[in-house]
Image (tube, rainbow, N blue to C red):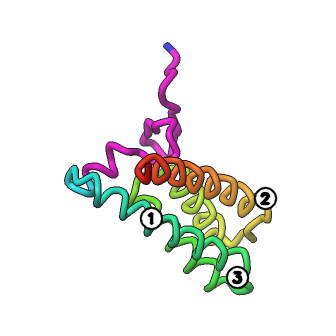
Amino acid sequence: MALKAASVEKLGEVAHVRAIRPIDLVHLAKQCLGDENLELEVLRLFDTTIKTYFGRLELAASYDDLALNLHSIKGASAGVGAWTIADLAKACEVEMQAGRPLAPERIADLGIAVEEVRGFIADMLGDQQD
């Protein structure tokens, strides 16, 4: 039976079902205790945070800078339910910890996910400003 509204990913031995939306709005609502105004404020802050840390990641020249920015991206993304970004950042961390260099393609994939989430946030915030 195929899942139409969700994709299934395997990380280790645990299967995670991910929503198709770039941000898991149910997770975000739980994090904000159902306060819609707080959700919007958290999304505004996350948008600024992810833009900042991804920009720093693109400019990172050392292992420590890469690791710090990836970890920050992963944590902030998991907090709001931006699972694709969190998973991609974690995969980059795992590669680096295994001693493999971080491929530019990995950063590009992360960048695509960041732009998708930022567009989703812009749409949500735009709907609220009318």
Of labels 1 and 3, earlier in sequence is 1
Residue found at the far left of this picture: 33
For label 2, the SS is helix
Report the front residue among 100 and 70.
Answer: 70
Q: Residue at x 42, y 60 (%)?
A: 43
For label 3, the SS is loop
- Identify the disc placed on residue 120: none
Asked whether disc 2 touches disc 1, contact meaning CB atoms under 8 Å apart, the reply is no
Task: State the separation of the CA atoms marked 2 and 1.
Answer: 28 Å
Whole-percent x, y for residue 47 in the image: 51, 65
Q: Which residue is mark 3?
A: 60
| Other residues around mark 2 within 10 Å, as few (<14) / some (14–19) / many (≥20) | few
Q: Amino acid at mark 3?
A: Ala
Q: Residue at x 73, y 68 (%)?
A: 102
Whole-percent x, y for residue 114 in the image: 61, 58
> Is residue 78 depicted above or below 124 in this figure?
below
Q: Amino acid at mark 2?
A: Glu
Q: Which residue is mark 2?
A: 105
Residue found at the far right of this picture: 104
Whole-percent x, y for residue 39 in the image: 33, 56
Q: Is residue 10 magenta?
A: yes
Of labels 2 and 1, earlier in sequence is 1
Magenta range? 2-30
For label 1, the SS is helix
Report the front residue among 17 and 57.
Answer: 57
Q: Residue at x 44, y 49 (%)?
A: 130
Of labels 2 and 3, earlier in sequence is 3
Q: Which residue is mark 1?
A: 44
Task: State the separation of the CA atoms marked 2 and 3.
Answer: 15 Å
